[in-house]
Amino acid sequence: MRPLNRVLALVLGLALAIAAVIAIVEVALLQADRQAWIVPRASWHDHLRALRWDDASLVITSAVLLVVGLILALLQLVPRLPRRLPIRTDQDTREVSVSRRALEGHLTRVAERERDVVTPKVRIRKRNVAVRAGFATTADPAEIARRLRGDLGTELERFQLADPPRVKLHLHPATRRVK
Amino acid sequence: MNATVDRVNRVVLFLVGSLFAIAGGVGLAAANEQVDLDEPRRLYRQAVDDVVDQPAAWATGALAGLAILAVLSLVWAWRQIVARADGPPLGTVDVEDTPLGRTTVEPVAVARALAQDLESVDGVTGAKVRVLTVAPQPHIVASVDLDAQASPDAVRAGVEEPIARACRALVVPAMTVDLRLNPSGTQPPRVL
C-alpha cells in the first residue's frame, strides 16, 4: 500500500503542479486580454454554456469520479500492519526490532519443515500469527496443529517480541500430494 | 521522514478521494434529478458574468493561490522521490577539537566499516548501517540479515563488540543503536 500511495501521490502532485502552472498562465493571459495558450477557450465556452446535468459527458465523468474517489478513500482506511515488530530490550540505548515480512518468511520456512504440512502461508497481523496450511489426508490434523503450534511458538519466543502474538492455525486437507 | 511522508500521503489521498466521490455523487444525483441544483450552463453563465468577465477583481488572488498550489504540489511530488528513512545523509563531523588539532570523521566511512564488522558476527549474513547523528551521542541504524540457523539472542550479544569498537573509533562512551533484524532463509556457511 505504501509504494502504491507513493506512486499515486507523485502522479497527483505532478498533475496538480502542471494544472496550476497552466492555470497561472491562462489567468495572466486572460487578465492581459491576450489569446489563450493551451486552453481552447472558445470550444470550452460553447460546450459549457449548453451543458446540462444529464449530458452524457457529465454523467460519465461523475460516475468515474465517484468510483475512483471511493476506491481511493477506502484504500486509505485499510489498517496498515507495522513494518517492524519491536523486540524486548532492557537497554536505554538499544532499540531492537525484527522485520515483519522477514519473520513471516522465517516462520513459513519453519512450518514447511514440518512433516505432512503442505504449502503453509504465515501472515503476522496485529495480535496474532495466522497460519494457513494444508495437511496430508493420511495425517492427524490435531497432531499437526500441536506440532506447528509448538514449533512456531518456540521460534516466536526466540525473537522475544515485545508484544508476542498468538498463533492461529487454519488447517485444511491438502489438495495435492505430499512428497 | 518516511513515516511522515506516508502519513501525509494517506491524509491527502483520503481527502482527494472523498472530494472526488462527493463531486461524482452530486453530479449523478443531479443528473437523476434527486437533488435540486441549477443546470451547469446556468451556473457557468453566472460565473462568467460575475467572475471571468472581471479578472481585475480576482486575478491577483487567484494567481497567488495557484502559485502556492503549484509549489506545494511540487514539494509533495518531490518528497515521494527523495524521502529517506531517518533524514538526509550526514556530512563530515568534528569529533574532537584539541589544541593539538582537530579530528573529523566521515559518517559514511564509519557506517561502511561498522557494517563490515557486523558481517563478521556469527549468524549474520549481511549488514547495512546508517549513521543518523554523531554528536553529542552517535545514533545509528543497523540492519542485519540473519542466516536460517542464527539465534537472535546470540546475534544481539555478538553485535555489541563491533559497536564498542565503533565507539572507540568515534571517541564516545556509548551510542544509540536501532538494531533491525531480518531473518532469512540463507544457510550458514559450512566449515570443512
Image (cartoon, coloured by chain):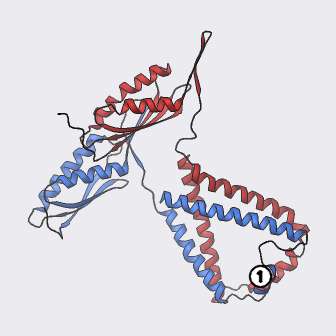
- Image vertical order of residue A135 relative to residue A158, above or below: below
Residue B83 in view here: yes
Q: Residue at x 56, y 26 (%)?
A: B135
The quarter of the rendered structure image containing the C terminus of chain B is top left
- Image vertical order of residue B181 relative to residue A38, above or below: above
Q: Quadrant of residue A19?
A: bottom right
In the image, what residue type sits under mark 1?
A: Trp
Q: Residue at x 52, y 44 (%)?
A: B85
> x%, y% of residue A130?
29, 58
Chain that appears red? B
Label 1 resides on the chain identified as: A
Q: Quadrant of residue B36?
A: bottom right
Q: Is residue A135 left or right of residue A164?
A: left
Q: Can you name the residue that lies furthest to the left here?
A: A138
Residue identified by numbered label 1: A44
> x%, y% of residue B104?
57, 22
- Image vertical order of residue B60 relative to residue A57, above or below: above
Comparing B44 with A92, the one in front is B44
Label 1: element kind = helix
**Callout 1 environment at 10 Å: few (<14), some (14 to 19), or many (20+)?**
few
Residue A92 in view here: no
Q: Is residue B79 left or right of residue B110?
A: right
- Image vertical order of residue B38 relative to residue A142, above or below: below
> x%, y% of residue B153?
29, 34
Q: Residue at x 32, y 29 (%)?
A: B158
Q: Quadrant of residue B87?
A: top right
Query: Chain A is which colour?
Result: blue
> x%, y% of residue A125?
36, 55
